[in-house]
DNA sequence: GCCAACGTTGGC
DNA sequence: GCCAACGTTGGC
């Protein structure tokens, strides 16, 4: 079992948007970075938990928890010329891009800002802190526990 | 809005 | 296969 952190710009898709979906599930589509693709295709498994992170806003923040409900499968938005994520090099026979499905779980009792994450020495090795742009990031068990505790979610 | 970091593209 | 140019991400 791994833990994950998924980034999203809330103006594009937010944690509340996930909550407000009828089934509280969402295709995590549109990832067009090979390192992130490899995680989605090979590593992200149903039942694994995700830190839902809002990026590219004045105060970037981990807002809540989600759960993977379906592991990697071809990102069909890449096949659709009308999609903004269309990629003519990807085909159903040989898909380049993959996605997973996630489900809303719960908000953190207290949101955890990037500023607080940066100032915690236990979190210094997170890609997030190392200024990685990676949008799908693995989270160690220690980092997971630390952030949940900071978010008022201990036990 | 700036710009550093860094991923991708394409000429050679 | 190198690497300069270019585009994108995302914190600030």
Image: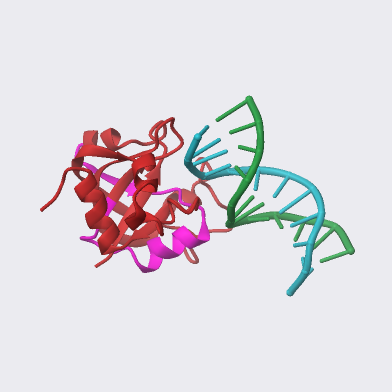
Chain colours: A red, B green, C cyan
Total label count? 0
**Is residue A32 part of the magenta span, yes or no?**
yes
The magenta segment is A22-50
At x 40%, y 33%, the residue is: A59
Q: Is residue A31 left or right of residue B6?
A: left
| Residue visible at 26% across and 61% down in the picture | A142
- The percent position of residue A17, horizontal first and vertical second, equals 29, 34
Tell me, yes or no, if residue A85 can be seen here: yes
Q: Is residue A57 left or right of residue A64?
A: right
Residue A34 locus on image (x, y percent): 51, 61
Q: Is residue A128 magenta?
A: no
Q: What residue sits 34% from the left and 42% below the top?
A: A116
Q: Residue furthest left?
A: A155
Is residue A140 or residue A50 the one in the foreground? A140
The N terminus of chain A appears in which quarter of the rendering? bottom left
- Residue A43's x, y, as percent? 35, 67
Between residues A8 and A89, which one lies in front from this camera angle?
A: A8
Is A130 or A138 nearer to us in this picture? A130
Task: Kindly identify the residue that appears in the image at 29 percent across and 37 percent down.
Answer: A15
A21 over A135 or under it: above or below: above
**Percent position of residue A152, x then y:** 17, 43
Whether residue A68 is visible: no
């Amino acid at each position: 079992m791994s833990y994950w952190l998924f980034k999203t710009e809330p103006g594009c898709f937010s944690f509340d948007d996930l909550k407000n979906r009828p089934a509280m599930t969402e295709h995590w589509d549109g990832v067009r970075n090979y390192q992130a693709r490899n995680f989605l295709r090979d590593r992200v498994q149903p039942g694994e938990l995700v830190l839902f992170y809002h990026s590219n806003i004045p105060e970037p923040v981990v807002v809540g928890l989600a759960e993977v409900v379906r592991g990697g499968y071809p990102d069909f938005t890449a096949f659709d010329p009308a999609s903004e994520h269309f990629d003519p090099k990807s085909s159903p026979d040989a898909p380049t891009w993959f996605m997973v499905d996630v489900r809303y779980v719960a908000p953190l009792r207290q949101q955890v800002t990037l500023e607080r994450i940066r100032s915690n020495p236990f979190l210094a090795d997170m890609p997030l802190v190392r200024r990685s742009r990676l949008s799908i990031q693995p989270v160690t068990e220690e980092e997971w526990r630390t952030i949940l505790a900071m978010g008022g979610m201990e036990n």
